[in-house]
Structure formats: C-alpha cells, structure tokens
Amino acid sequence: MPKLRAFNIGMSLDGFVAGVDQSLEEPLGVGGEELHTWMFDDPKGVDADFVARRTQGVGATVMGRNMFGPIRGEWPDDRWKGWWGDDPPYHHPVFVLTHHARDPVEMQGGTTWNFVTDGIESALAQAYEAADGRDVALGGGASTLRQFLEAGLLDDLHVAVAPVVLGGGERLFTGPLPAGYGVIEHVPSDAVTHVRIGKVSASASS
Amino acid sequence: MPKLRAFNIGMSLDGFVAGVDQSLEEPLGVGGEELHTWMFDDPKGVDADFVARRTQGVGATVMGRNMFGPIRGEWPDDRWKGWWGDDPPYHHPVFVLTHHARDPVEMQGGTTWNFVTDGIESALAQAYEAADGRDVALGGGASTLRQFLEAGLLDDLHVAVAPVVLGGGERLFTGPLPAGYGVIEHVPSDAVTHVRIGKVSASASS
C-alpha cells in the first residue's frame, strides 16, 4: 500500500528544523543551511542511500506553503513559482497547502504546482491519486509535518540529526509522539544520525 | 592543564536530558532512563570507550543538588546520602552545590560528599584542588551544566543523543551556545550519537 513519507528532515541537536529569522535570503533561517550540508557535500554510504530514497518510488509531493515560498496571505500575482527555478527537482505533481486559491502552474521537467485550499486530507487524497500507486513525499515546514503526524497520516518520518546547536528557530517536536508512533530505525553516519519514526502499533492507524 | 568535563549526558532527539515528573522513584523523570540504556546494556566499542572516560584521570566531581538527591530546601536531617548506596561509584571527593550548609559525609570506597554553599566558582576551585592535577567531572542536572557552560568554565561537554522522543522534561540547551563554543567531536555508534562540545576559539576562555 502506498505510504506518506517525509525524507531528509535536517534537525539540530537542540531539536530545530529551521533557525530564527526565516527570509527570502535564508529560507531555513539563521544557521538552517548547516542542517543540510550532509546532503550537499558529496554524500556517501548511508547518507547517499537516504538522499536517493527521496525519489525512489515516489509519485507526488505534498508541502506546506512556507516551504513553497516566502509569500504570506493572498497571492499578489502569479510570479512566484517556488525556490527552485524553471525545472524544480520534483518531476511530478506537487500539492501546496494554502488558504488562498491559485491556478496550477506547470513547470519544466514534469513538476506541477497544485494549490490545495481544503485541508490536509484533501491534499493527501489528491496526491495519492496523482502518485498512482507510488508513495507520496511530505515536505516541510515543521507545522505541516506535525499536522500529518498528529492526524496519524504520516507513515514514515526520516530525521537527520546534525551535530549543530542552533539555539532557536522552529522545532519539529513540540510534545510527545502521537500514540502508536516510535523510532523504527536508527542509523548513524559520520555526518549525521538518521532516525526514522513510524507506526509501531495498530493504535496509530487512522 | 586540568579540565572540567561533563561525561555521558544522555539527551533525547527533542533535546531533553530528563523527562517530566522527576521523583524519588524516577530520578530522571518519565522516560529519562531510556536516555542511558546505551551505558548499561553491555556497551561496546566507542560506547564503552566513552563510558570508561568518566573515571580516567578524574580526581573530583562537582554536581548539582538535584543530582545528589530529591530533597529541596533545608536538609531535614543527615540521613540522605545520595542515590548510590554505601559505596558510591565516584571514589573521590564530590562537591555538591547547595544553598543549605551541611557537614561533609565520608562514604565507603573513597567518596566524600562535600556541600558547597558559596557558588560554582568556589565549588570548582575546591574540586580542582582536591583533584590535585587531574581533571574534574561535572555532573548534572541540566541547570548545573548550563551555569558552568555559560560562565565559560566547562571545557568539554559530552552529550549522547539517544533515538528517543521524550516530548517534555528538562532541556540541556535553552539558547545558542556561548561565544567560542562549538561541536569538537561527532562519533556515532549503533546505539547513540556521541557529540562533544568545547571551546573552539580563544573568546571562550575564562
């Protein structure tokens, strides 16, 4: 059965997935880029394996609006088309959670931005349909990840803990894991510690 | 030159070094014991190396009162002599930070409890003198560790990040590292990720 999976969520030692003062220049906030250097510094071994999983058997992506761009409130126009240029690295339909309707945008390379205004279940249902039997990837930010986790909809949350203390920013975990969730894998590398959180008992099924 | 070093501080993925509801029955709070199973489950390799460092070249220990026992306020009598029985695993002088004076207590095996009421610098000076050229170990709890770190007195903070989400409790880091401190070592094992924080520039010297 297809699953909803979050990949390569970089987290600091003190639990932050983004630093303070997120902006157009620093989408992940002050120090936030350090959480992902392991992915971009020629990853090897287990690190490379985890990076590769992001695209293997994945047919659609759901992401929060803050991951899509820095604009808040109504869309002023149709010019903002994501952080990733004309050919974003998704190559499949992406469903962006927003409170403000907007027409789909087709990009080069197979990525389509679809804007979903009627909630996370709707976005996920559309993504599963578009993925056509493959898995769906869940992007950030932290509040999007938490919403799907707390609703019991997230099957697999891969966190990469980087040896960095950010001191402030946006936390991934703001309370206990929902009932039924636990750590299902723990794989250290020289650069980070990979931890996967998933359903460990039937009580987490939704 | 002798150093002040904190060893084997277990921390959860979400940054807690103790769970909620610390009590006589659960000194580390709910779930807190899970942070230290790596130490007690027949540690091997790098884990065993880190456990062994606790006693190598260490001649005295400083700890906070909450690590010494559950009693708050005035000492009602002299009966509480720590969590560790008649022969505590220190085997050297231990300096307990407290606001309430109490006579020293000599235990079996070389451990002495000394109660220091005039602050962290005084406790540390007494510990360095007792250690006679060897290092001094710093115990918890979290607030004790933070006080020495923020005063620039802590040379080496070894944290072992366990793949556990506690969801609440006592945080080790409540803000950025003091200027001059950074991650000086990152060694993963199958059980935990060992991270050492220390002085990376002269601005941290005290």
Image (cartoon, coloured by chain):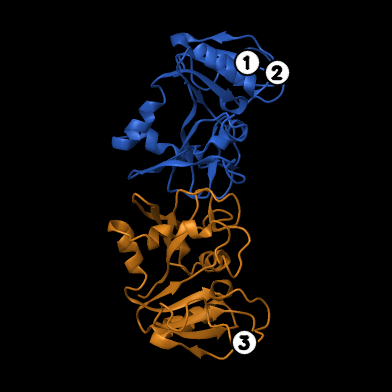
Chain colours: A orange, B blue
Circles 2 and 1: CB atoms closer than 8 Å? yes
Tell if the residue under mark 2 belongs to the same chain as the one under mark 1.
yes
Q: Amino acid at mark 2?
A: His
Q: Amino acid at mark 3?
A: Ala
Q: Chain of mark 3?
A: A
Disc 1 designates what residue? Answer: B115
Q: Amino acid at mark 1?
A: Phe
- In the rendered image, residue A147, in percent from the top left (x then y), is placed at 56, 67
- In the rendered image, residue A167, in percent from the top left (x then y), is placed at 59, 49
Residue drawn at the location 39% of the way across and 82% of the way down: A91
Residue B150 in sight here: yes
Disc 2 designates what residue? Answer: B100
Distance of mark 3 from mark 1, alpha carbons? 66 Å
* Disc 3 element: loop
Q: Residues within 10 Å of mark 2 (few under 14, many from 20)?
A: some
Q: Chain of mark 1?
A: B
Q: Quadrant of residue B18?
A: top right
* Disc 2 element: loop
Q: Mark on residue B157?
A: none
Q: In which quadrant will I find the C terminus of chain B?
A: top right
Residue A199 in sight here: no
The correct choice, above or below, for A167 with respect to A125 in the image is above
The correct choice, above or below, for B160 with respect to B133 in the image is below
Disc 3 designates what residue? Answer: A101
Residue drawn at the location 39% of the way across and 61% of the way down: A39
* Disc 1 element: strand
Q: Residues within 10 Å of mark 3 (few under 14, many from 20)?
A: some
Q: Residue furthest front?
A: B202
